[in-house]
Image (cartoon, rainbow, N blue to C red):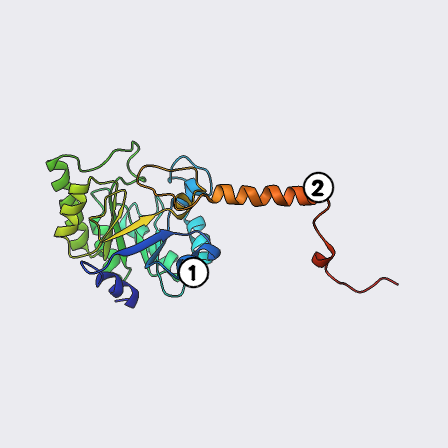
Amino acid sequence: MNKKIKKILLKKNKSKIVSLTSYSKNIAKILDKYVDIVLVGDSMANVLYGHKNTHQISLDSMIQHTKSVKMGIKKSLLVVDMPKGSYNNIKSAEKNAKHIINITKCEAIKIESNKKNYKIIKILVKKKIPVMGHIGFTPQFKKKFMIQGQTKSQAYNLLKEAKLIEKAGAFSIVLECLSPETAKLITNNLKIPTIGIGSSSYCDGQILVTDDMLGISGFYPKFVKKYTNLNRIIEKAIKKYTRDVKLQKFPKKKNFLNGSKLR
């Protein structure tokens, strides 16, 4: 087993797992100093490409961004979302997962559960492809946003789903937008770590979309804490640059490149 994955597994019931998303080397380089897991999420469809959902991001786009992210990572575990349509069956899942890992040198892939693809996870793990699971609100399969696990029967169905993913061999599982009680139930009944997004502090770890918590995505649901307003900081810098160019304050002589003198 990969040493980084072993390290994540050992954190269960001991210390919280910290995870954030990245789509580029520059952000990944910063994250790598602090987080345990960097996820190249299909959320880039919304965040970078302006799509209404995550369905339209291509495998090639995921691979290109992951190659960039990989350049900024030394210590963190690099996980990549399998985009919608890339794991519809065992054959395509294996082919595409191997393709992602071979080209990007990431350590694991993430698959959203549709309550049917446990066998796909099992086969991938058997082929030595580490898999992170994902249950609850799964954007690739559920159109309408709803808090998941709000009744006892829903909670136990989600627990059953999580246990089947664990049994299939996943090393961890994302719990998205689960009620606190359901998140706690699942976390307490799994041997593998749970990583929550909008699923309370009962999970073994947390993940957010980096652009959301930095205040540059324009998407701020209740479960996102905005740690800064980068939009405002960037706008201030752009305004200053614009003013300097118009008033001929930039570039100054100190910004000139000194080439050879014309004779």
Percent position of residue 195, x then y: 25, 51
Q: As shown in the figure, which amino acid type bears the numbered disc 2?
A: Lys
Q: Label 2 crowding class (10 Å Cα cut-off): few <14, some 14-19, many 20+?
A: few
- What residue lies at 74% left-to-right and 56% top-to-bottom? 253
Q: As shown in the figure, which amino acid type bears the numbered disc 1?
A: Lys
C-alpha separation, residue under disc 1 versus residue under disc 2:
39 Å
In the image: residue 108, left or right of residue 257: left
Q: Which residue is mark 2?
A: 246
Percent position of residue 169, x then y: 20, 57
Percent position of residue 63, x then y: 43, 53
Percent position of residue 177, x then y: 25, 40
Which quadrant would residue 76 be assigned to in this image?
bottom left
Closer to the camera in the image, 44 or 20: 20
In the image: residue 177, left or right of residue 102: left
> Judging from the image, what secondary structure is the residue with disc 1 in?
helix
In the image: residue 200, left or right of residue 227: left
Query: Can residue 57 be seen in this snapshot?
Result: no
Closer to the camera in the image, 77 or 199: 199
Q: Which residue is mark 1?
A: 70
